[in-house]
Amino acid sequence: MPGLHISDHQMRLYMSSRLTLSAEAAAAKAESAAARAEAAAGRVEDAARRAEAAAQKTEAIFMKHMRK
C-alpha cells in the first residue's frame, strides 16, 4: 500500500519471489504474508485476552470460596 512502511521480512520475501515471479506477483505475495502475520497476531492477542479473562474469573470464584 502506498505510504506504508514495509518490514524486512516483506522485503526479503519480495526479493526472493522476484527472482521467479513478476514484480506485481512478488509484491502481492509479500503483502499477503504481511496480512497473514497481522491476522495471526490478532488471534494471539485475542487468545491472551480470553486467557486473562478466564484467570480473573477463576480468581474471583476462588476468592469467593475462601471468604466462606
Image (cartoon, rainbow, N blue to C red):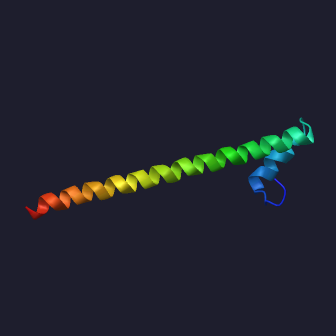
Point 78% across, 57% down: residue: 6
Residue located farthest toward the left when viewing the structure as drawn: 68
Of the pair 50 and 9, the residue shown nearer to us = 50
Where's residue 57, x and y in %? 29, 55
Q: How many marks?
A: 0
Where's residue 34, x and y in %? 71, 48
- Say above or below: 21 vs 48: above
Where's residue 16, x and y in %? 84, 43
Residue located farthest toward the bottom when viewing the structure as drawn: 67
Where's residue 64, x and y in %? 16, 60
Point 65% across, 48% down: residue: 37
Left or right of 40 in this view: 14: right
Point 86% across, 47% down: residue: 15
Point 90% across, 39% down: residue: 19
Of the pair 19 and 49, the residue shown nearer to us = 49
Q: Quadrant of residue 8?
A: bottom right
Residue located farthest toward the top when viewing the structure as drawn: 20
The C terminus - image quarter:
bottom left
- Say above or below: 60 vs 15: below
Left or right of 17 in this view: 57: left
